[in-house]
């Protein structure tokens, strides 16, 4: 390359696993194209991994290797640190140290950003360095850039996304192939999709990390992971999937952040979505984020949500951004959380009890006159109106019928109270299954 500054930018990569390995591969394979875009070559000077004898998915010839990640951060020859180890303890230490030393950081670590992002961005702002995190949300989909820059003229009303590839892969394989939960999770781990602790994927914690980040950049609020309401997919049964289909819905694990007059909803849970919505048909490891904004209306972003090179695509795009802006005035860069640091709002996050949604309810009740009337009376007393009811007669040896209902909108607190009353009826058996329903209409 030639130009005012044609020296290569030297980077250090911490972590050579799925994403680190993919990043090395993409940087090496597309080196020329990347340099033409960035204006300077990008050289991987040093990289670290825990076990240097482990086989890698990438070629590390010519890269100095170390098992101590601090060596990379402290290396005076490195301009940009790429953090790809995961977790939020050592990663936080390394990122804060890099910032302290005036180095730019690129990370794919949503746990780190969701939990410590406010502190990290504050430190970065003071040091005039960039901390780029496109790969932290929805794998290869450039959703951070889309919201932070592409939609900068809009007031964003809500964001709803399938933002965990592992969870969506499990739900899809269970529905389409009748495979067991455990079997599909194992495959997701082998493919490198799952987190080091896969309960983060199946219990919605990973999606809540990502949703926290999306909400911050969509609404201009600080990162508030501790206020996100999180429910996983482990309780979803193939029976519920089947009933939902009969009612014209698909069950998806959604992260939803919505601005309301009372505050901001921040919630991750299994959700029934009308089957005809594009997002209801996003399957496998693919992710999709639907953003409803006032000027443009709804826009949908779709792509691979996990995996080595899909995620590397976002890591490398961030590197290109960092390289392009290396010489620009720190005050004039795109703000980390989309809004200027001094202009973040203190809008409250709504407690889940106050959130209004429609519900899918499944319960087992004695098949005799008056039982359905008792249930509908409880719902009626709580001002919960019913949109649809299906009753499945009991098989010969069973005493209870299965009743499935769809309700209209109601506050979560009222629904929980009504469910408790239904469960206490002598004519019902066991727990009521409750899954939230979202229409995701353009007018919502
Ligand atoms: P991996 O487990 O595949 O890789 C982690 C890497 O970090 C490994 O090379 C490992 O070394 C190294 N490492 C881990 N702990 C330490 C430690 N204590 N000291 C030194 N090195 C360490 O993880 P992924 O690549 O899947 O994930 C990395 C990050 O990217 C995470 O934050 C994850 O959430 C995020 N992410 C992952 C995606 C994916 O599809 N996998 C997608 C988007 C984001 P060794 O190899 O020797 O064990
Ligand atoms: N474990 C995450 C997922 C990786 O499955 O979505 C991508 O962030």
Image: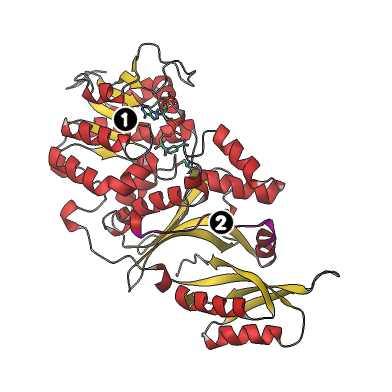
Q: Which residue occupies the foreground of this view, 138 or 324?
A: 138
Name the N-terminal-most of marks 2 and 1. Answer: 1
**Percent coordinates x, y for residue 340 in the rendering:** 19, 52
Mark 2 and mark 1 residues within 8 Å of each other at the beta carbon? no
**Percent coordinates x, y for residue 271 in the rendering:** 54, 61
Q: Secondary structure at mark 2?
A: strand
Mark 2 residue's CB less than 8 Å from ligand 2: no
- Tell me the quadrant of ligand 1: top left
Residue in the picture at 56% in, 56% down: 252
Reading the image, the residue beneath label 2 is: 252
Residue 180 vertical position relative to residue 230 in the rendered view, above or below:
above
Residue 320 vertical position relative to residue 424 in the rendered view, above or below:
above
Residue in the picture at 37% in, 68% down: 351
Q: Secondary structure at mark 1?
A: strand
Q: Is residue 85 left or right of residue 440?
A: left
Magenta run includes residue 266:
no
Magenta run includes residue 237:
yes
Residue 175 vertical position relative to residue 320 in the rendered view, above or below:
below
Residue 40 seen:
no
Kindly report the distance in space between the C-alpha atoms of the residues bearing marks 2 and 1. Answer: 32 Å
Q: What is the magenta segment's predominant secondary structure?
A: loop
Rendered-image quadrant of the C terminus: bottom left
Callout 1 environment at 10 Å: few (<14), some (14 to 19), or many (20+)?
A: many
Residues drawn in magenta: 227-239
Residue in the picture at 71% in, 46% down: 177
**Percent coordinates x, y for residue 263 in the rendering:** 32, 69
Q: Which residue occupies the foreground of this view, 222 or 309?
A: 222
Q: Residue furthest right?
A: 396
Q: Is residue 343 left or right of residue 25?
A: left
Reading the image, the residue beneath label 1 is: 82
Callout 2 environment at 10 Å: few (<14), some (14 to 19), or many (20+)?
A: many
């Amino acid at each position: 390359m030639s130009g005012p500054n044609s020296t290569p930018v030297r980077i250090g990569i911490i972590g050579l696993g799925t994403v680190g390995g993919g990043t090395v591969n993409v940087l090496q394979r597309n080196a020329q194209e990347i340099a033409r875009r960035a204006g300077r070559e990008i050289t991987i000077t040093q990289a670290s991994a825990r076990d240097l004898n482990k086989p890698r998915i990438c070629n590390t010839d010519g890269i100095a290797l170390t098992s101590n990640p601090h060596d990379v951060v402290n290396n005076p020859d490195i301009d940009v640190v790429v953090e790809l180890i995961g977790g939020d303890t050592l990663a936080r230490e390394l990122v804060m140290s890099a910032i302290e030393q005036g180095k730019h950081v690129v990370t794919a670590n949503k746990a780190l950003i969701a939990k410590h992002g406010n502190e990290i961005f504050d430190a970065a702002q003071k040091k005039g360095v960039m901390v780029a995190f496109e790969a932290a949300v929805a794998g290869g989909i450039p959703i951070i850039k889309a919201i932070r820059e592409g939609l900068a003229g809009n007031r964003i009303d809500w964001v709803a996304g399938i933002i965990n590839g592992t969870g969506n892969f499990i739900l899809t394989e269970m529905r389409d192939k009748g495979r067991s939960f455990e079997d599909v999770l194992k495959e997701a781990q082998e493919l490198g999709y799952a987190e080091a602790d896969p309960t983060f994927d199946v219990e919605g914690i990973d999606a809540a990390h990502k949703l926290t980040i999306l909400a911050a950049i969509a609404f201009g609020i600080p990162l508030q992971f501790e206020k996100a309401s999180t429910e996983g997919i482990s309780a979803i049964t193939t029976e519920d999937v089947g009933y939902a289909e009969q009612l014209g819905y698909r069950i998806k694990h959604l992260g939803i952040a919505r601005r309301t007059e009372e505050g901001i909803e921040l919630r991750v849970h299994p959700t029934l979505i009308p089957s005809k919505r594009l997002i209801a048909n996003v399957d496998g490891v693919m992710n999709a984020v639907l953003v409803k904004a006032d000027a443009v209306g709804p826009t949908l972003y779709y792509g691979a949500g996990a995996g080595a090179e899909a995620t590397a695509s976002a890591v490398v795009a961030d590197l290109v951004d960092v390289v392009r802006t290396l010489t620009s005035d720190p005050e004039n860069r795109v703000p980390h959380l989309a809004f200027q640091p001094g202009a973040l709002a203190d809008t409250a996050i709504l407690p889940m009890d106050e959130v209004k949604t429609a519900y899918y309810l499944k319960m087992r009740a004695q098949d005799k006159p008056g039982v359905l009337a008792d249930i509908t009376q409880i719902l009626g007393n709580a001002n919960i109106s019913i949109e649809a009811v299906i009753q499945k007669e009991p098989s010969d040896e069973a005493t209870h019928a299965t009743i499935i209902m769809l309700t209209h909108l109601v506050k979560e607190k009222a629904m929980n109270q009504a469910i408790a009353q239904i469960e206490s009826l002598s004519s019902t058996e066991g727990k009521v299954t409750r899954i939230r329903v979202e229409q995701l209409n353009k007018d919502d």
